[in-house]
Image (spheres, helix red, strand yellow):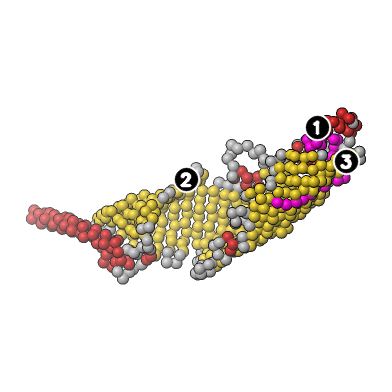
């Protein structure tokens, strides 16, 4: 019995010693072989791969440390990975050129991006070891979980399954945090149509649902529904000719918005709204593009704004119809109702040029002067009357000094109030009139007219007329864009 125990002990010792021998024998050989194979991996130029350390633990664990994917022409353009723990049958990889396993990526860094991830992957079988580790042969990736941070955006619990050979995936779910707000992004493949994908985003005050169909040569967004605060959109879009040098794209749909909430998106919460913007917007749009330049975009829109308020200005309704072609925005039909008056006009502008040159014509008919004045000064007055006007203007939108044009204003059927309304314009003359003719305080302005030209950041008039039953005043002069008056009566 003792002899059997001794034989068993000796055999056990031999097994352990042989295992240790295999371990210490294989470790440096395999590590050297792995490094050699990594050096053979070809990456798209000018990218280069380097690894500072390779550790092998028989029979299925390799740790790669200090991986750097660098751009040969841009020294600062680097992807750094602190460590990758690879679990796979390494000997099978080296022998049969097949790679299937798991990887734990720790501390991948690229500029503002940071990533930790647990992955399962499958490479296609290859003819050579060099091909076996070629990234282009990656066939399938399963993301068990991952953590990603980019600037102030972090995402975790990333899960999904990707088939790279088919450019397809069964689904993915991402829980993310942005500025301490939590959200969820989901994507999955439609079970009935293999090439149709359904995606959704849920975030405080934001939701997006869309369906995407992928074909050999096109991306088709059959339905996009989005809500951002009180902005809602229903759109469809497509990109065709992906195999061509210049793919063509198109989008159509409608957008609705509460302008008051849109304005608040671009303001800090502690800024008082001294000039509130209010109103409702609906815009039907069609956009197509035959390339990547601004001049390649063509668009049509019909936009309606209702119950508009901008500061003290109120506009009941605005209808705008126009199109964008070859970099020029042509709003050929502008209609508005403002204080019961009707405004009509048109405008075109080179919106993609640095100067933003524009040309516009506007006509106004029967605006109710009393309603407009009461709203602007926030005080009830006895002023009544109607106002007609027209203006044509052109120049560069970024340089008021380039504005040139002409126009006229005509107030009629009016009671513009007693003489004091003219005091700011005729200055001391009004004081003289009051002393000479006390009845002047009872005189009312029943009609007013002015034609003018625009240049050098000024409106110039040779005919400024105020008339009533017992008064006629004529003047000329200039009014600067900054409010400076230089008038002679």
Q: Residue 276 carries which label?
A: none
Task: Identify which residue, 36 or 472, lies in the foreground.
Answer: 472
Label 3 environment density (alpha carbons within 10 Å; few <14, some 14–19, many ≥20): few
Q: Is mark 2 on a helix, strand or loop?
A: loop
Which comes before the other along the chain, label 3 or label 2?
Answer: 2
Residues shaded magenta:
404-427
Name, please, the residue furthest toward the top: 435
Identify the residue at horizontal 63%, vertical 57% (top origin).
350
Instruction: Report if residue 24 is visible in the image.
Output: yes
Judge depth for marks 3 and 2 and give the one in front: 3
Ranked by sequence position, the earlier of labels 1 and 2 is 2
Residue shown at the point (25%, 56%) measured from the top left? 56
**CA–CA distance between discs 1 and 2?**
63 Å
Q: Is residue 298 above or below residue 365?
A: below
In percent of width and height, residue 204 lies at: 55, 46
Mark 3 lies on residue:
472
The percent position of residue 322, horizontal first and vertical second, equals 69, 59
Q: In this view, does 376 lie to the left or right of 117?
A: right
Q: Does the stretch in magenta take in 418?
A: yes
Q: How far apart are marks 3 and 1 (CA)?
A: 17 Å
* Residue beneath the point at 59% across and 45% down: 265
Q: Which of 456 and 300 is in front in this view?
A: 456
Up-down: is 89 above or below 146? below
Pick whichever, 171 or 264, lies toward us: 264
Q: Residues within 10 Å of mark 2 (few under 14, many from 20)?
A: few
Instruction: Check disc 1 and report the residue beneath it.
Output: 428
Q: Residue 212: x percent and y percent?
A: 54, 62
Q: Name the residue under label 2.
A: 152
């Amino acid at each position: 019995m003792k002899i059997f125990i001794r034989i068993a002990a000796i055999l056990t010792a031999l097994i352990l010693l042989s295992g240790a021998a295999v371990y210490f024998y294989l470790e440096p050989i395999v590590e050297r072989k792995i490094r050699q194979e990594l050096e053979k991996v070809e990456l798209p130029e000018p990218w280069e791969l380097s690894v500072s350390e390779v550790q092998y633990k028989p029979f299925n664990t390799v740790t790669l440390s200090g991986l750097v994917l660098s751009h040969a022409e841009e020294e600062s353009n680097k992807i750094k990975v602190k460590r990758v723990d690879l679990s796979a049958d390494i000997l099978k990889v080296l022998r049969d050129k097949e790679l299937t396993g798991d990887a734990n990526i720790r501390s991948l860094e690229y500029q503002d991006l940071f990533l930790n991830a647990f992955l399962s992957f499958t490479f296609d079988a290859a003819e050579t070891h060099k091909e076996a580790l070629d990234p282009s042969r990656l066939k399938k990736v399963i993301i068990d979980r991952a953590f990603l941070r980019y600037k102030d955006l972090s995402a975790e619990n990333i899960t999904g399954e990707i088939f790279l050979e088919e450019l397809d995936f069964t689904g993915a779910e991402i829980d993310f945090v942005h500025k301490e707000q939590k959200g969820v992004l989901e994507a999955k493949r439609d079970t009935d149509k293999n090439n149709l994908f359904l995606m959704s985003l849920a975030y405080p005050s934001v939701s997006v649902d869309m369906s995407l169909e992928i074909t050999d040569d096109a991306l088709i967004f059959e339905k996009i529904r989005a809500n951002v605060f009180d902005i809602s959109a229903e759109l469809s879009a497509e990109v065709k000719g992906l195999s061509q040098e210049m793919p063509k794209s198109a989008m159509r749909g409608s957008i609705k918005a509460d302008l008051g909430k849109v304005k608040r998106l671009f303001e800090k919460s502690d800024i008082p709204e001294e000039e509130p913007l209010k109103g409702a917007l609906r815009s039907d749009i069609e956009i197509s593009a035959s390339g990547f330049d601004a001049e390649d975009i063509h668009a049509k829109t019909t936009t309606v704004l209702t119950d508009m308020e901008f500061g003290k200005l109120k506009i009941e309704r605005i209808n705008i119809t126009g199109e964008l072609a070859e970099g020029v925005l042509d709003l050929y039909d502008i209609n508005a109702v403002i204080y019961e008056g009707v405004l009509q006009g048109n405008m075109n502008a080179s919106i993609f040029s640095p100067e933003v040159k524009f040309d516009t014509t506007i006509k106004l008919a029967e605006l109710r002067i009393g309603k407009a004045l009461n709203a602007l000064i926030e005080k009830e007055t006895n002023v009544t009357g109607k106002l007609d006007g027209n203006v044509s203007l052109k120049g560069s939108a970024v340089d008021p000094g380039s504005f040139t044009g002409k126009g006229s204003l005509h107030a009629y059927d009016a009671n513009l109030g007693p003489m004091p309304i003219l005091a700011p314009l005729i200055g001391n003359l009004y004081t003289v009139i009051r002393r000479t003719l006390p009845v002047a305080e009872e005189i009312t302005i029943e009609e007013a007219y002015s034609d003018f030209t625009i240049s050098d950041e000024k409106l110039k008039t040779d005919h400024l007329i105020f008339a009533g039953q017992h008064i006629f005043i004529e003047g000329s002069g200039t009014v600067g864009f900054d409010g400076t008056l230089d008038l002679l009566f």
